[in-house]
Amino acid sequence: MNAPDMIFPLERPTGVWSNQKVSIELLFSHLSAKKITNLEVRWNIAETAIKGKLIRKRITAGLNEIGKIEFLAPNVSEPKLLKLSLKAICQNKKLNENEIDLFIVPKDLLKNSHARFSVYDDSEQKYFSSDGIRLYPGEKSDIIYSTTYDTHLSRFAELGKTIILDLSDKSNFSGFGYTLRKREGIEEGKWVGGLGVIHKLIAGNEFKGNILDHRFRESYPTHYLQGEFNFHTKSLIGMFIGWMHRPMNFMVSIPLSEGKIILTTFPLKKFPDSPVMKALF
């Protein structure tokens, strides 16, 4: 970031669908005293044969628009994080290099899952049906998605099923020792740094860095679950503000007999349109 000449994208994509056309606009910041002509930008995606180059004949001091790189995202069967490498070259000499993460998610990830899904609320079935996901009756399912809670859901969990309770659209909820709170003031995180963390049980290979990175910027929860924050027991995803201050739960797991209820404030219903939410789901 301190390089006087630097190649970088105008915006990093949070996630893209496998086999989808991707377009990324590149910029070149020229602040050194070097005279740069015929700038060549070479790019490639690691572990693939996808590559290309852009040439800009004239580079002026300050910010330069280089153009767009376009490609079809690689075909993957599971969410995968690949590196997009950028190299700025002038007169066969490397001026600068950069790389960004490219998070690729297959559109049919949930459709091809071995899990049997059920939707507790009839009004929420449209999200699953629009994505081509087969739905089962609650008794025959493995996972039940719901945006409302009643004791009947708890009975499903006691039978060994996983209940995903999506609270992202709710303004109030209280249960299992947790209370839904709106993120505001310092907890909104707009003026002070925060560290979002993901438990290894749910991070998998998709989020193995174990932090809420730039991929989540369009899907950050507006609410959190106030209650016990403990990564040894119930907490799966959460955030600290500043120096390990004011811990907030975004996802917790509540064991109930043979099953469990997962409370989350992430907008999981975005999954038909959000690669990141589909991968998290």
Image (tube, grey):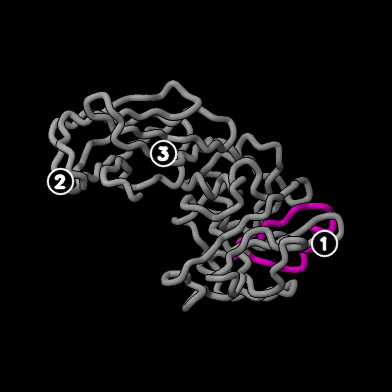
Magenta-colored stretch includes residue 151: yes
Q: Which of marks 2 and 3 is in front?
A: 2
Q: Name the residue under label 1.
A: 256
Q: Residue furthest right?
A: 257
The amino acid type, in three-letter code, at marker 3 is: Glu
Q: Is residue 107 shown to the viewer in this render? A: no
Q: Mark 3 points at which residue?
A: 99
Q: In this view, does 124 lie above or below 168?
A: above
Left or right of 227 in this view: 182: left
Element assignment for label 2 = loop
Q: Is residue 96 above or below residue 178?
A: above
Magenta-colored stretch includes residue 33: no
Q: Name the residue under label 2.
A: 61
Magenta stretch bounds: 148-167
The amino acid type, in three-letter code, at marker 2 is: Ala
> Residue at (57%, 55%) from the top-left corner?
124
> Residue at (32%, 25%) from the top-left corner?
52
Disc 3/disc 1 C-alpha distance (Å): 44 Å
> Residue 171 or 189: which is nearer the viewer?
189
Residue 237 coordinates in the image, percent (x, y): 63, 59
Left or right of 111 in this view: 41: left
> Residue 56 or 198: which is nearer the viewer?
56
Q: How crowded is mark 1: few (under 14 residues within 10 Å), some or many (20 or more)?
A: some
The disc, 2 or 3, on the residue closer to the chain's N-terminal end is 2
